[in-house]
Amino acid sequence: MSRLSVNPLSEGLRLERRPEPSVLLIFGASGDLVARKLVPALYSLSQQNLLPARWALLGTSRTDWDDDRFRAEMKAALEKFGDLQGSDGALVDEFLKSLFYIRSDTEDAQSMGDLKSRLEEVEKLCLDRPNRLFYLSTPPSVFATIAEQLKEHGIARSDGFTRVIVEKPFGTDLQSMRELNRRLLAVFDEEQIYRIDHYLGKETVQNILVMRFANAIYEPLWNRHYIDHVQITAAESIGVGKRGGYYDRVGALRDMIQNHLFQVFSLMAMEPPVSLQAGAIRDEKTKVVRAVRPVAVEEIDSLALRAQYTSGSIEGGPVPGYREEERVDPDSSTETYAAVKLRVDSWRWAGVPFYLRSAKRLPRRASEVVVHFKPAPHALFGADGSNRDTNRLILRIQPDEGVTVKFRAKLPGQDLRLRGVNMDFDYGASFGRKSADAYQRLLLDAMLGDPTLFARGDLVEASWELLTPILESWQERGAKGLAYYEAGTWGPAEADRWLAPEGRAWRRP
Amino acid sequence: MSTAERAGLDVRDIQKQLRQLWEDLAAVKAEDGQEALVRSCVLNLLVYSSGADVAALSTGLAEVTSEHPGRVLLLLVSERPNAGMSAHVTAQCHRFGKGRQVCCEQIWIEAGLHDGGRLASAVSPLFVSDLPVVLWWREQPRLGESFRDLLEISDRIIVDSCKLNSSSGLLVELAALADQKSPGKLFSDLAWGRLSAWRRQISAFFDVAGFRPHLDRLEEVRLSAGQDQGEGLPSVRALLTLGWLASRLDWSPRRASRAGRTWSIEFAAGKRSVRTTIEIRKGDGLQKVSLLGSRGSDVFEVRRAGEHLVSEVRLEGDRTPGRLVRHEADDEFQLLARELEIMSRDRVYEQALQMAAKIISLGQN
């Protein structure tokens, strides 16, 4: 290795994670995600001096824009969605100078040739070997086609690195996921594919790893001997909004549980990785998802539950029922509430169910993981020390990110009366600093070639294997067996009855 | 306010005041029906300062503890003889979204210079147990008894070498102190934090693999900076920048000389020589750093332009437009907050400091 194969001046800089010079080529660059999330995240990275020393963004889509129009649109997006605190016009203009645009159509060979020429022209500004990062911010139906066109026109390979970021959903069931994977893997290696799940970019989701593996006090308790069950919840108070057309084809199980909640589950249940290397962590995550017992057809109703919201009220205002939402089929049987019970066949987790639930139009937005510990083995304190109100460890993912430990304490006084008390750790308040947006973290990781926080194909496939029988059964039965809940309540009564025979109840976040 | 007898502080009384303070704050919250008070603590911040500008100091420290919550022990040491030691406690609260309020406590201890030898024993019982103690020596470093005593009870020491005055030996002494390699002691310098943006910009040139070979062909480095220490001394920031470059690139200083407001230092870089100059100009801080090769026709340059840093590469006359970034703030509280983010030894800084000390020693011989 040459003496200068690495930059000797970068050592000890407090921003050691600065990536190599590269070009980010975004497909679907005129879309909402780019304006709302990606460009503001990139601008924030540039303000923290975290972008490569030489870097450019080449946007492309079918929209007939040029560089100037793209820059003007992105400038407006930054003013609306960006964090411009401490910034000034000169810094914004400097950032916009690195943005370029070309119209393209993946079905038009001439257009793809023009895209290649423009990409090579932009790459010259990076003064280095061509490192390419593609971002597919397009409808999932064209992910594979874009990848194939990149290969056909000689764009998918370069002398530097090439990586591709794919937005969710990664398929709609096991078969479509395998087909998408097959076509992507015909162009890129698995190591080049970065399946983005913005949940994994959240600070508190990453904190699960830190809490579990940087604190020795939890590990001895983290098993079937002390944990009764785990509830992982993603509750939203909003309805489907303008996404009715999309959501009606997808439902809560595909939209949230298959991806976000399975990722959180795998972090909670995985064995300790041997290192922080991406491969080591992702191996353990996949192993635990594979250890989940498959769902037999006859078990589906005892292991999964679905419901749909009807009209009700949220925050004091009336809201329509799901079937009355814009672009939703009036006879739709799509679930807006889904819950599944996962049984992990491992020494650590035998007999400890993990309940995953996600729903729209619940009273408040809250994502959390709740570890319910077993009661003390002997009720020494009589009724006050009964099995109700057991110890809990609550990891709040959003909002008010933090950790709460629930334990019992004696009320002051002559009598021996016990009360459950919460000991709160508030992530934002304790460190007094806003967490970085998930897209900032994930875009930077992709530029650096760190796939730790991206979903690997085998884990995605394993999750679809588990959930596809449930989805097929629900589809086959249509509205039969679908429960209903009033918007603004914590779900259908059936959900409580579903859990009650096991002596458990849903926690109200 | 608790004023103890001259022999020392009444620690029990201070602890009682602290308890009372939290109970009062919690009671106010409960009456107002607000959310419970959040108390967090990640460190003990021991601040040694003169009694001047106390209100600004307290407010600035409150900003720091909003990011790094902890107990602040503010040692206000006045020039008055026999002033005696006294203490009182206050809380600084910050609101975070949705009315949540986080409060951090400050213990102000007023002492006279003659109390120097007893300061360490006075503050030790007041530390929150099991948390690191960071000493911020806010004054011109005086490597006397109190400094060494407080150093002894601290895990980390933060100074600001830009506050050095005409005593050039202090930088050399600081370097020696940092080089003692006391186990568990960390040494930091706000002057180094002021150079972060400069170092990032200079380093960024050579993130481009094609530019890296130029590092082995550098012939000259020119730095210009304002006077940030006593007359007759090169700028600390320029010295640390040069120390950083030399230590990263394995250069050894051969000789140093001064002519008027310009210092010239020659380094051996393997079989080559690298000429460097530090020119003192009007203004403050580092102003320009130029790395030159091929008899001056290859130039990598970072310069300050108002609130920004501008970088530029000129190779054989071809100019590559540089990047414009924000020049980081010089505010000492912001710099302190950034320093507190890192709780590990900064060997790159220590090596830069050692190199800077060598340059000074050469110049004095």
Image (cartoon, rainbow, N blue to C red):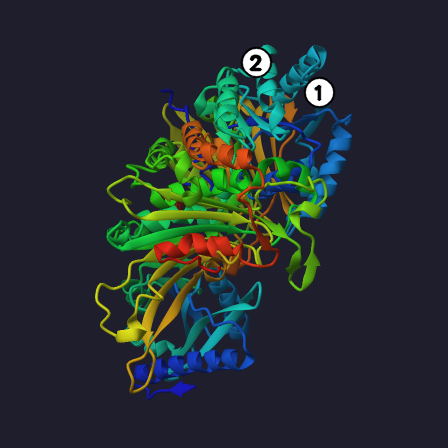
Mark 2 sits on what residue? A151
Which mark is drawn over residue A362? none
Residue A120 visible somewhere in the drawing: yes
Name the residue: 50% across, 26% down: A177
Q: Dot 2: what SS?
A: helix
Q: Do the residues labelled 2 and 1 touch (CB within 8 Å)?
A: no
Q: Which amino acid does label 1 sit on?
A: Ser
A342 versus B125 height, above or below? above
Front in this rendered view, residue A364 or B150: A364
For disc 2, the neighbor class at 10 Å (few under 14, some 14 to 19, many from 20) is some
Quadrant assignment, res A345: top left
> Do the dots labelled 2 and 1 sit on one chain?
yes
Question: Dot 1, crowdedness within 10 Å: few (<14), some or many (≥20)?
Answer: many
Q: Sequence-wise, which precedes: disc 2 or disc 1?
A: 1
- Picture coordinates of residue A213 (x, y %)? 31, 47
Task: Estimate the x, y position of residue B357 in percent, counting from the top left.
Answer: 37, 47
> Viewed as shown, does residue A245 lie left or right of A430?
right
Figure quadrant of the N terminus of chain B: bottom left
Q: Is mark 1 on a helix, strand or loop?
A: loop
- Could you tell me which chain the residue with mark 1 belongs to? A
- In the displayed structure, A407 sits above or below A436; it is below
Location of the C terminus of chain B by quadrant is: top left
Q: What residue type is labelled 2?
A: Lys
Which residue is the extreme one toward the front? A480
Residue in the picture at 55% in, 29% down: A166
Q: Can residue A397 be seen in this view?
A: no
Q: Of residues A33 and B220, which is closer to you in this image? A: A33
A295 displayed left or right of A241: left
Residue at 52% x, 64% y: name it: B63
- CA separation in Å, label 2 and label 1: 15 Å
Subunit that carries the residue with mark 2 = A
- Badge 1 is on which residue? A104
